[in-house]
Amino acid sequence: MKKLENYEQILNKIKEEKYFLLYVSMNNCSICQIDMPKVEKIFNEQNFTAYYIEGSEIPEAVGQLSLFSVPVVILFYEGKEIHRQAKIIDFEELNYRMEQICENVINKITI
């Protein structure tokens, strides 16, 4: 998972990437540290592009993305946020949503 350093990088990824996962954490969040490897396992299995930010380092992103608690997982597809989980991450639901995106991409390619 690659770290994004500023809000402009996030906006560029939203414009440039077909789909990706954004993981938001804070330095002093123990749950964030516990959940991050679990999220990494899922996106690695799905061959999904993923990035993360430290919310305390990019306050503009916190405001612009309405990040009120951490950890947060946001799935973007074709420039839009299509799924968000905050505070308590349902890993089965996250995996399911990522599978949906991957299937949709494959179906568009084969049509």
Image: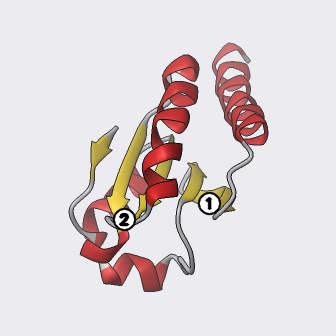
Q: Indicate whether 20 appears above or below 22.
A: above
Tag shown at residue 81:
1
Q: Quadrant of the N terminus?
A: top left
Residue depicted at x 74% and y 39% = 97
Tag shown at residue 5:
none
Q: Secondary structure at mark 2?
A: helix
Q: Indicate whether 38 appears above or below 34.
A: above
Image location (x, y in percent) of residue 62: 43, 79
Image location (x, y in percent) of residue 111: 74, 18
Residue 26 vs residue 77, the one in the foreground:
26
Residue depicted at x 53% and y 76% = 67
Residue depicted at x 67% and y 34% = 98
Residue depicted at x 31% and y 76% = 56
Residue type at tag 2: Leu
Residue 16 vs residue 74, the one in the foreground:
74
Q: Give the Cα separation between the discs numbered 2 and 1.
A: 12 Å
Tag shown at residue 11:
2
Residue 39 vs residue 31, the one in the foreground:
31
Image location (x, y in percent) of residue 99: 71, 27
Residue 8 vs residue 56, the one in the foreground:
56
Quarter of the view holding residue 54: bottom left
